[in-house]
Image (cartoon, rainbow, N blue to C red):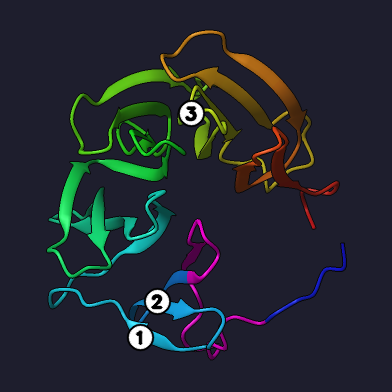
Amino acid sequence: HHLTEQRVTSNSPEAPLDSAVTSPDGKFVAYSDPTGLYLRVIASGETRSWGLPQHFTAKPTAWFPDGTHLLVMRWEGTPPTPGLWKLSLLGAAPQKLIGSAVSGSVSPDGSRIAFGSFLPYWGSELWVMNADGSNPHKIAEASRHANPPSGILSSAWSPNSRRIACIERYGFAGLAPAAGLSSLWTVDAEGGDRQLIFNNNWLGPALSWAPDGRILFATRSNPAS
């Protein structure tokens, strides 16, 4: 196949992208920058602001498989705490699913959401809940129990919605050329059968589980670079 590259956004250096996710059908990109949350139609280049209540700021983390709902992370309260919300393209009011949560990913069948805990440390525990926010429960935790422990940067569901892949990284993995500070592992959606796939000195947060069964992730050979 011949691959072509297409520029989707053209933000200025003063308003860099915070986060961006592509819809399941490949037609839209939801992205956030310091000025707000936006929806861009890839084919036409049309960009419009996502209609949100005043002072509602959020970063997109995943699309629901129906292509009309978006999972976002929003900080609120004093002190600010992150939580996961569900937004609708059809104009419904934002729906809060759970507080004290980060890095959400939606299962391909749309039934469940995996996310990292915010407390006691950012991403130190992996949780799963139903898509409506009910029945949240911990299924795994980071393997390094230093103070602070390592964190789960991201998660991705298998195509059959039965397993979850995670990128785990110790907080100082990007600062020193030490080995084994990052890892890729999978666990079943109930928390059993944890399997280490890969150890590395640096793994980025980008992670996806392709329909053909491959797990895609980012790494670099020199963590100091």
Residue under numbered circle 2: 39
Q: Are marks 1 and 2 in contact (CB under 8 Å)?
A: yes
Residue under numbered circle 3: 161
Give me the residue at 25% from left, 69% from top: 57
Image coordinates for residue 187, horizontal then vertical, percent: 54, 18
Q: Is residue 87 visible?
A: yes
Q: Are marks 3 and 1 in contact (CB under 8 Å)?
A: no
For marks 3 and 2, give the CA distance. 27 Å
For marks 3 and 1, give the CA distance. 32 Å
Q: Are marks 3 and 2 in contact (CB under 8 Å)?
A: no
Residue 216, labelled with which disc?
Answer: none
Residue 48, labelled with which disc?
Answer: 1
Amino acid type assigned to the residue bearing label 2 in the image:
Leu
State the SS at label 3. Answer: loop
Q: Which range of residues does the magenta coloring cover?
A: 7-28
Q: Is residue 71 left or right of residue 53?
A: right
The answer to which of marks 3 and 1 sits earlier in the sequence is 1
Quarter of the image that includes the N terminus: bottom right
Image coordinates for residue 147, horizontal then vertical, percent: 46, 27
Classify 10 Å Cα crowding around label 1: few (below 14), some (14-19), many (20 and above): few
Give me the residue at 38% from left, 36% from top: 115
Image coordinates for residue 74, horizontal then vertical, percent: 26, 58
Q: Is residue 143 visible?
A: no
For marks 1 and 2, give the CA distance. 5 Å
